[in-house]
Amino acid sequence: MAAKDAIRRHKTELQDILCLDPQRILDRVFQTSDPVLITQREYRELKDINKDDVEGHVISLVDKIMDKGEDTCKRFLDLLQTDEDIKDTFPDLEKIQWNIDPTLLKRTLDDTKQTNHGGPVQGKRHKDDQDELTSTPTGLSVKNINIVNNNNIGQNNTVAHGRLQKKPRYADGDDTVAGFVHRVTDIQTSKKSCRYFNAVIQTGQEEFHRAVIFSAAKHRSFSQAANNSTPVKLSRIKKSWSTSDDTFDILVSDISFMAETTVPFIPKPPTASVNMDIAQVLKMGPKEMIGKLQARVICIKDGSHDMIKSGGEDQEIKECWISDATGQVVLRLWNSQINRIAINSCYEFSNVSTRRQTEFYLTCTKQTSITPVADLEIPHHLSMPNSVEEPLNATSGPIRFVRLTNKRCCEKCDKSQKDIDPQSVVVHRCEGCELNQRVDSYASIVSGTVMMTTSTGEVDLTVPPSPLTAYLTSGDLLHLLKDTDELEKHFLVSPSFDVVYNASNLLTKIQKTSAVAENLRALTDEPHS
């Protein structure tokens, strides 16, 4: 069987295994040379992938290897089967039956080396490819992880000046930790329908470890331990080397168990639970949590307003600039969070996360809370954003066509409900978190499209939920959210509206045109004799 065909045949199984430590396999593939498997540019692109979970990094890596052809696939398989560090880190690779003739792999590798040593080296790295590599935290995978003893952890590597260096190995058989539980998240569901949640385990006065719990049934016990500051012992867990520091993460499964215990230290919130300023935040890496941050909203970026697909759901996003006495940064808001802020107002933002794509920014999470605070002193040079915002469009006129849809969403998990009829049922079990709730407790999320007739022609606009909700709130019309037919009629019978929209034709503000403005416009539009 050809190497590329073998990878394709075992692609899902291979990706599940490599997701245990995606940064490790990416670093090791990048370090392979003579010739290189991936270039410096490809390494950076793969490392910076923005995915809902870390499987995206591994899937893209395997796809890129396959796209490079048969010879690259053979060298990749040789790395998986012969590299001692890879074999230690991913012991389950030995279970894959590749059915590849080892002599074929060796012959291909020898031919490649001979070609490269005898002539121009193909794929030779540029000088800037030798820069020191830094490992970026990519989170933990939720892919088919078996909880085993610590003797399967293997050795971890750091990359410094192009050389792999071993990290110290923890004692074999240490599959128990004791301490306090902090920051238990809600239950989440991965792309492959695996339910899990995260927490932080304090194992010393100044020692904290990330934990991923692959057992939704344990959520209640972890939450109680966190709320009551009860010291616990976790047994039959696995320690997995962290991709962001020289310690380990904790993986908990169905066979793990928790018991109360005593520890020689007192509970202390993790660093991310204390107040931080923007200067400290700007020094953090991507995908790190921030406990509390107080800042003023100095600019709302209407040009960034957009509707995207995330987790299979339509999501509304909008960005703003926030500032404190030490700096300024962009914050991304989602869905109902958009209407919770106002320009020049000050807030405490808790449980936000850092991100980096082309630029560094913050994003709200499902656990984020936004609380108004007293006015903050902001230096003059930080009271305006350090970038120019996109220009917006404004127009007025009647709405000629309208189509609105009402989506019922669980306020606990944000899952939209497909099977819910508020006219015939009183309670409904959420299709996401599976909590049984009153039907009227589900949020009504209304969005759609309109076509307006203006003085310059007709314009089609996308109407997201937040400006529509803001309009109805200001006019004491929120009751119309429950009846889209009546809401559509309201827009069609009203004489005229003033709207603002961005370059994507997404409506950002809407209000009724005043009677004075309508009369002035009528006079202006009348033909002169």
Image (spheres, rainbow, N blue to C red):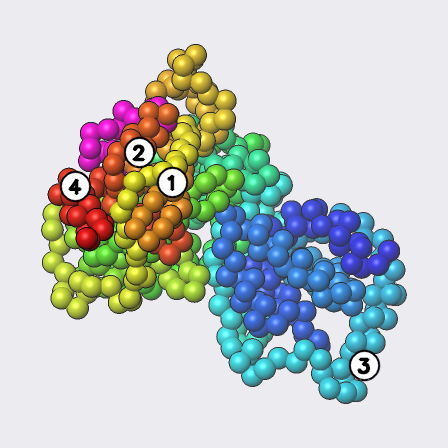
Q: Position of residue 267 (x, y in %)?
A: 31, 42
Badge 2 or badge 4: first in the primary sequence: 2
Verify whether residue 212 appears in magenta. no
Q: Quadrant of residue 335?
A: top left
Q: Position of residue 391 (x, y in %)?
A: 30, 61
Q: Is residue 66 left or right of residue 139?
A: right
Mark 1 — residue?
450
Residue at the spot 44% in from the left edge and 18% down from the top edge: 421
Instruction: Identify which amino acid the numbered label 1 is placed on.
Output: Val
Mark 4 — residue?
514
Badge 4 or badge 1: first in the primary sequence: 1
Q: Is residue 410 visible?
A: no
Tell me, for residue 413, which label it has, or none.
Answer: none
As drawn, 525 above or below 479: below
Mark 2 — residue?
491
Q: Nearer the viewer, residue 226 or 131?
A: 131
Residue range of the region highlighted in magenta in the rendering: 470-484
Instruction: Identify which amino acid the numbered label 4 is placed on.
Output: Ser
For the residues labelled 2 and 1, say whether their Cβ atoms are less than 8 Å apart: yes
Q: Is residue 371 left or right of residue 85?
A: left
User: How many numbered discs, if any?
Assistant: 4
Badge 3 or badge 1: first in the primary sequence: 3
The CA span between labels 4 and 1 is 20 Å
Residue at the spot 52% in from the left edge and 40% down from the top edge: 312
Q: Position of residue 422 (x, y in %)?
A: 40, 17
As drawn, 227 above or below 498: above
The CA span between labels 3 and 1 is 66 Å
Q: Nearer the viewer, mark 3 or mark 1?
A: 1
Q: Position of residue 301 (x, y in %)?
A: 29, 55
Mark 3 — residue?
114
